[in-house]
Image: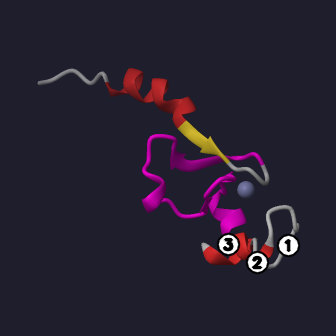
């Protein structure tokens, strides 16, 4: 039987997730994930959490420009 040491490994990865640029919540996107495969990532701006990426069209802040928000929808 192999001993489980996964807990220690996962604990170190806790800080490796992106923070949402809008609500500053921790997202499920890892910093090491390729931006090409991310959802809710805005080039040159940062990462949105799932919730913000789903609602951004209803809550226009105007901070980043409408083109940026719709291009990644
Ligand atoms: Zn958010």
Left-right relation of 71 to 24: left
Left-right relation of 56 to 38: right
> Which residue is disc 1 drawn over?
60
Q: Disc 2 vs disc 1: Cβ atoms closer than 8 Å?
A: yes
Residue 54: assigned label? 3
Few, some or many C-alpha atoms within 10 Å of disc 2 (few <14, some 14-19, many ≥20)?
A: few
Q: CA distance from mark 2 to mark 1?
A: 6 Å
Residue depth check, mark 3 versus mark 1: number of the one nearer the observer:
1
Left-right relation of 5 to 8: left
Asked if residue 30 lies in the magenta stretch, the reply is yes
Residue depth check, mark 3 versus mark 2: number of the one nearer the observer:
2
Q: Place residue 43 in its image quadrant.
A: bottom right
Quadrant in which the C terminus is drawn: bottom right
The magenta stretch spans which residues? 24-53
Q: Is residue 2 above or below residue 50?
A: above
Percent coordinates x, y for residue 18 in the rendering: 60, 43
Q: CA distance from mark 3 to mark 1?
A: 12 Å
Q: Residue at x 76, y 46 (%)?
A: 24
> Splitting the image into four quadrants, where does ligand 1 fall?
bottom right
- Report if the beta carbon of the residue with label 1 is closer than 8 angstroms to ligand 1: no
Coloured how?
secondary structure
Quadrant in which the N terminus is drawn: top left
Residue 57: assigned label? 2
Left-right relation of 66 to 73: right
């Amino acid at each position: 039987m192999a001993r489980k040491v996964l807990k220690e490994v996962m604990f170190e990865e806790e800080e490796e997730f992106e923070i949402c640029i809008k609500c500053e919540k921790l997202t499920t996107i890892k910093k090491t994930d390729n931006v090409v495969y991310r959802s809710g990532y805005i080039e040159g701006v940062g990462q949105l959490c799932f919730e913000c990426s789903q609602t951004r069209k209803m809550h226009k802040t105007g901070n980043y420009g409408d083109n940026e928000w719709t291009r990644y929808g």
